[in-house]
Amino acid sequence: MNAQQSQGTTLFTALLVLIGIGVVVQLWLLSASVDAVFRHDGRIPALAAIGSVFLFLVNGGLLLFVFGFDRKIRER
Amino acid sequence: MWPVCSLEIEMPEEQKKECLECGKKRERWREDFPIGWQGDNYVTRREMVKFLALGSLTIAGANFVVAGLPHIVKASPMPRTMIALASSIPVGGSTLFSYPAEEDPCILVRQRNGDLVAYSQVCTHLSCAVIHKEQENTLFCPCHQGYFTVEQGRPYAGPPTRPLPRIKLEQHGNEIFAVGVEV
């Protein structure tokens, strides 16, 4: 494994962990939303939905970055 | 990719056949089903990242559905039910009734200042029935020693953390009506 591949593997692992943390936070937001709905609190689910979409955009951005990085490596 | 031939099952040599790819002897059935199932189970980091991003999208969608649910499913209007006669409840006294359905027990209390308050009788800890302690002017759950204030139904001792749902009341003359529930 050359240095570039090694760097790519490290990057992939780091992004995988970051996206994984994002998904766990989204799950937490979802459970908080369901809890708030049962308590008839309309404010928390709306904020949680906005937060969840933001996290999805971050995750999607990281995924696109991975694909872009991958393409760049293959083109070389 | 994982090597297919590493998964050979113990069987008589005469039933095995030589693999054309690697030269090892393999079971005959593998010729008919040349699928490396270990390879199928192997997930790359890229696939994992894609899977997580897809999961992220799904959860975000679910969160939107949960947020929109109360706006889509409107709660049915609460009935207006006559629950007691004001003259029948002395100062510091209480009475039981059901609202909005027969299986929803509630408690109506006349406070020391004469005001009437009503709450769901179901404890917010583990759903035992709360009772009114006149001497201590408190609502008490005997199952786990939970205490709620009579004035606002807020928990102040014991395991409950959420207040009791409050029943909205209206008084017309001597008659007391329950008209809604505040959670």
Image (spheres, coloured by chain):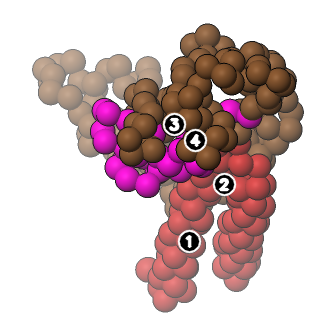
Residue B68 got which mark?
none
What is the magenta range?
B139-168
Q: Colour of chain A?
A: red
Quadrant (top left, top right, bottom left, bottom right) of the C terminus of chain A: bottom right
Same subunit: marks 4 and 1:
no
Q: What element carries label 1?
A: helix
For image coordinates 64% across by 41% down, the residue present is B114
Chain containing mark 2: B
Q: Is mark 4 on a helix, strand or loop?
A: loop
Q: Do the residues labelled 4 and 3 touch (CB within 8 Å)?
A: yes
Colour-to-chain, brown:
B
Residue farthest toward the bottom in the current orientation of the protein? A3
Same subunit: marks 1 and 3:
no
Circle 1 sits on which residue?
A18
- Residue B133, quarter of picture: top left
**Res. B21 visible in picture:** no
Circle 3 sits on which residue?
B92
Circle 4 sits on which residue?
B111
Q: Is residue A39 magenta?
A: no
Circle 2 sits on which residue?
B56
Q: Is residue B161 magenta?
A: yes
